[in-house]
Image (cartoon, rainbow, N blue to C red):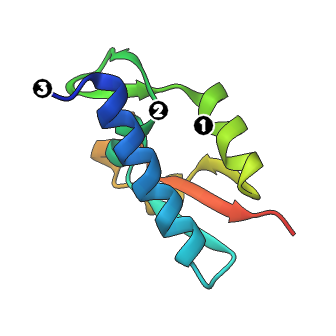
Amino acid sequence: MPKTDNDIALEWRNAIEKKLREEKDNEIIIPYSQVSLAFPGGPHPNSFDIQLIDSKSLQSWAKKLGWSVQTAPEVTHPTQKNTPWIHFIRIT
């Protein structure tokens, strides 16, 4: 049986959660493309390859795990300004 979009999102969410749980530092930066697979929010107006991120779901999920989330424009290449890396910061 083929995987559904929900199955794929859950797999990506679990992979990101694993990264967060294993992270020793209080912050980690993850590519937009990976986060958008975990929290798909619909078509991205600037890309056919990447979904928008469902920010509300991402923020709620991250908070439950003890992390805050924001974009990381400081590490994002100018050509990726519409898909910035995502910065997770441990809530202390």
**Three-letter amino acid code of the residue under disc 1:** Leu
What's the distance in space between the residues labelled 1 and 3, CA to CA?
A: 28 Å
What's the distance in space between the residues labelled 2 and 3, CA to CA?
A: 22 Å
Query: Within 10 Å of the Cα at label 1, are there few (<14), some (14-19), or many (20+) other Cα atoms?
Result: some
**Given the current orientation, which residue lies at the most extreme bottom position?**
24
- Identified at 62% across, 59% down, the residue is 88
Q: Nearer the viewer, mark 2 or mark 3?
A: 3
Q: Are marks 1 and 3 in contact (CB under 8 Å)?
A: no
Sequence-first disc among 2 and 3: 3
**Three-letter amino acid code of the residue under disc 3:** Met
Sequence-first disc among 1 and 3: 3
Could you say whether the residue bearing mark 3 is in a helix, strand or loop?
A: loop
- Identified at 37% across, 26% down, the residue is 6
Foreground residue among 3 and 89? 3
Foreground residue among 77 and 62? 62
Q: Where in the figure is residue 1, as x and y percent of width and height?
A: 12, 26
Q: Nearer the viewer, mark 1 or mark 3?
A: 3
| Labelled disc at residue 7 | none
**Three-letter amino acid code of the residue under disc 2:** Phe
Q: Are marks 2 and 1 in contact (CB under 8 Å)?
A: yes
Query: Within 10 Å of the Cα at label 2, are there few (<14), some (14-19), or many (20+) other Cα atoms?
Result: many
Tell me the residue that label 1 is attached to.
58
For residue 74, above or below residue 70? below
- Identified at 40% across, 57% down, the residue is 15
Could you say whether the residue bearing mark 1 is in a helix, strand or loop?
A: helix
Tell me the residue that label 2 is attached to.
39
Judge whether residue 83 can be spotted in this image: no
- Identified at 29% across, 24% down, the residue is 5
